[in-house]
Amino acid sequence: MKTLPPLNYIRSFEASARHLSFTRAAEELGLTQAAVSGHVRALESFIGRPLFYRTPRSLGLTEVAASYLPTLRQALGQIEAATGQVMTQRHRQEVILACPASLATNWLGARLRRFRAAHPDISVTVHATIWSETLDQIADLRIVPRQDSAPVQGVRLLRDTLAMVCAPGLCAGPGALARPADVAGAGVIHILGRHEHWEAFCRHHAIAPIDPGSGVKTDSTNVALEFAAAGMGCAIAPRALAGIHLGRGVLVEPFPAEIPSGWSYDLHPGELAPSRASERLREALIAPDPAP
């Protein structure tokens, strides 16, 4: 890039060549005639060749200038187009958010409702991903699950605790859950790939391990929570995912405890260039929840 002259030299030369007048070029560019002619002289010195024939009443292009000009005009057009694209992207009023389906279903809704109330002019599209590596859709922002032992990528959005939940009916009447050890006899719902959640529950309450081969199994946290709401047994899930069911009263937490889940969620920039709209959504997602 060491052979590139300053852009203001190029702009002054192109305008002067188009008008064949330093005065009219200066009027177009909002500069003085002396500044424009000085830019042109500096460009001539930079390339070591004259660009204009100067007479008292007019300018004429040299052969060098005539061959130089079309390429410069094309380059200026490309710069203008590229700048326009960036400015359009910057002012784009749409945000695409990629988010794990379980978090989108159970945690994201209330936050997007508040965001839409504050920014009704910004359109939000949510791609609900199944696994963190799903990249089928490009996005402005990505929420990605991460084990707590792994380094933070982007901005930590939340570090979750576990909630052991069940239908309200399991906490009433004969055979009601009275202590954590009763969970095994009430039926257990396992989430495949998250066996450590039940292990953490048992460790926290100092009870015997729960047989991983017992009860109902599913590969979806949402499905496990719905099974629990249907009275099929007890499930354990991150509180951010169980919270909406607890709030609706379809699930209860008979033995509340602060048990780390071992997982966090990070907010990453996506593949699209940042825009003001995506920055607004990012700020809203990382902001603390309002006091109840």
Image (cartoon, helix red, strand yellow):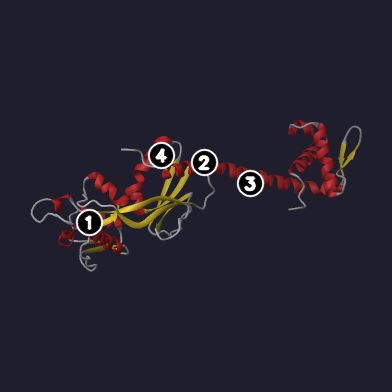
Q: Earlier in the sequence, mark 2 or mark 4?
A: 4
Quadrant of the frame with the C terminus: top left
Which mark lies nearer to you, 3 or 2? 2
Residue annotated with mark 3: 82
In the rendering, at what x and y percent does residue 14 appear?
77, 41
In the rendering, at what x and y percent does residue 250 appear?
21, 48
For the residues bearing labels 2 and 1, Cβ distance under 8 angstroms: no
Which mark lies nearer to you, 4 or 3? 4
Find numbered disc 2 in the image and state the secondary structure of the residue it sits on: helix
Disc 2 residue type (three-letter): Arg
Disc 3 residue type (three-letter): Ala
Q: Residue reaching furthest bottom?
A: 213
Disc 1 residue type (three-letter): Phe
Q: Earlier in the sequence, mark 4 or mark 3?
A: 3
In the picture, the disc for residue 103 is: none
Q: How far is the residue under mark 2 from the one under mark 1? A: 41 Å
Residue annotated with mark 2: 276
Residue at position x 74%, y 34% in the image:
29
In the rendering, at what x and y percent does residue 105 appear?
33, 50
Q: Count every numbered label the image shows and give the total.
A: 4
Q: Earlier in the sequence, mark 4 or mark 1?
A: 4
Q: How far is the residue under mark 3 from the one under mark 1? A: 53 Å
Residue annotated with mark 4: 115
Q: Earlier in the sequence, mark 2 or mark 1?
A: 1
For the residues bearing labels 3 and 2, Cβ distance under 8 angstroms: no
Find numbered disc 4 in the image and state the secondary structure of the residue it sits on: helix
Label 1 neighbourhood size at 10 Å, few (<14), some (14-19), many (20+)? many
Residue at position x 10%, y 56% in the image:
175
For the residues bearing labels 2 and 4, Cβ distance under 8 angstroms: no
In the picture, the disc for residue 227 is: 1
Find numbered disc 1 in the image and state the secondary structure of the residue it sits on: helix
Q: Earlier in the sequence, mark 3 or mark 1?
A: 3
